[in-house]
Image (cartoon, rainbow, N blue to C red):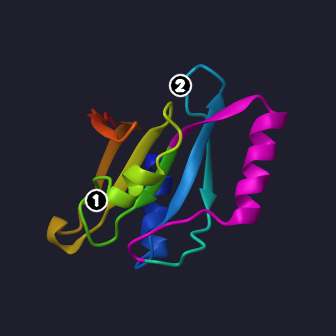
Amino acid sequence: MVDAILQQALECYPEESCGVILGPIGKDEPTRIKPMVNSAHSPVFYEFDSRELLALYREIEENDKEIVVIYHSHPTSEAYPSSTDIAYAGEPGAHYVLSSHREELGGKPEFRSFRIVDGVVTEEAVEI
């Protein structure tokens, strides 16, 4: 799934890529990646396509799944939640994963995970 997230970020460049990873309710276990369309088509902001988002919530409800990971890329900046990311973080149980392929990394991608609860950002260790 990490490779898929990083590949999507490259394919969407220079826009932010985005998506979710679903899993069984209450298990904090990622099982299925679901890339989403960034309807904002922006290099500094992402927004899930409204039709895809509606379909996502139907799928979650019908299959007893939950969002385990919400991910997006920062094409030209650090893989750290922006003030906008923090303000829009509405899933307190989710892991917020950010990636970056910014130039100063010399081709090596950055991949980080955070919890964002009530505006407080806590970084999580990522082991690949």
Quadrant location of the C terminus in the rendered image: top left
Disc 2 secondary structure class: loop
> At label 1, which amino acid type do we have?
Pro
Q: Which one is closest to the eye, mark 1 or mark 2? A: 2
Relative placement, left or right, of 107 versus 99 is left
In percent of width and height, residue 33 lies at 60, 47
Percent from the top left, x then y, of residue 122? 28, 35
Residue 19 location (% of width, % of height): 56, 55
Give how far across and how far down residue 121 sits, in percent.
30, 40
Residue 116's quadrant in the figure?
top left
Q: Which residue is mark 1?
A: 109
The crowding category of the residue bearing disc 1, from other C-alpha atoms within 10 Å (few below 14, some 14 to 19, many at least 20), is some
In the image, what residue type sits under mark 2?
Asp
Q: Residue at x 84, y 35 (%)?
A: 62
Q: Secondary structure at mark 1?
A: loop
Residue range highlighted in magenta? 43-69
* Residue at image mark 2: 28
Numbered disc total: 2
Task: First in sequence, mark 1 or 2: give its number.
Answer: 2
Q: Is residue 51 magenta?
A: yes
* Residue occupying the point 27% across, 37% down: 123
Residues at discs 1 and 2 in contact (Cβ within 8 Å):
no
Name the residue: 28% across, 53% down.
80
